[in-house]
Image (spheres, grey):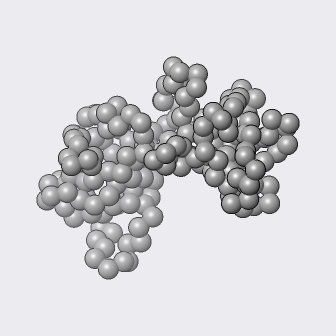
Amino acid sequence: MLIVGRIGKPHGIRGEVTVEVRTDEPEDRFAPGAVLRTEPGARPRDEPGAVPVAYRVPAELTVEAARFHQGRLLVAFEGVLDRDTAEALRGTMLAVDSGDVTPPEDPEEFHDHQLVGLAVVTPGGDSLGEVVRIDHAPASDLLVLRRPEGRTALIPFVRAIVPEVDLAGGRVVVDPPAGLLDL
């Protein structure tokens, strides 16, 4: 599963919701007719102002319409016709099957799901850990590593520090500057 977005607050009274986009291709992922799988949201239902759980989030949602408004993606899903139902979706993660995603044409470009789980090694072959996720920061993407001792480290995903990604070999070569892994 590849997370492509997270449903935010309702917009208006007709069931539209804001979506926090987590894909480089929102026009494709949120095109009318696109079917997105759902994962339960992290928002507790007993917080103040929460909607009673009379509406159960379906396993899939079909995009009826999508548009950008003031820099935010607004999406209408089939069957979500009012604000209360839209509110019940808040916090729901939206995903697609990673097998349905075509690999990038550029050999230097990767989807997050291709990198997660890869071993991280130094140019000399010493183990530094495993990629557990990718954080998309404004300056550059960051590889989030689980270090052998259990803590995490952030590695800027730039060629100067990450000279090689070997998908077939299941590894990422990282040449960290002194002190980077000590932060």
Residue 48 point in image, percent of width and height:
32, 80
As drawn, 144 above or below 41 = above
| Between 128 and 12, the one nearer to me in the picture | 128
Q: Quadrant of residue 29?
A: top left
Extreme-top residue of the structure: 105
Q: Position of residue 176 (x, y in %)?
A: 73, 45
Location of residue 145 in the rendering, given as x and y in whole percent from the top left corner? 68, 51
Residue in the image at 68% along x and 43% along y: 117
- Which residue is pictured at 48% across the width and 29% down the height? 100
Q: Is residue 60 visible?
A: no
| Residue 100 as seen in the image, left or right of residue 149 | left
On the image, the x and y values in percent for residue 166 come to 71, 29
Based on the displayed image, in which of its 4 quarters is residue 151 positioned? bottom right
Using the image as rendered, state which of residue 23 and residue 182 is in the foreground: 182
Between residues 170 and 96, which one lies in front from this camera angle? 170
Identify the residue shown where x is 54% and y is 34%: 111
Q: Would residue 138 be seen by someone viewing this image from the given angle? A: yes
Seen in the image, is 114 located left or right of residue 55?
Answer: right
Which residue occupies the extreme bottom position in the image?
A: 48
Residue closest to the eye, 121 or 84: 121
Q: Residue furthest left?
A: 13
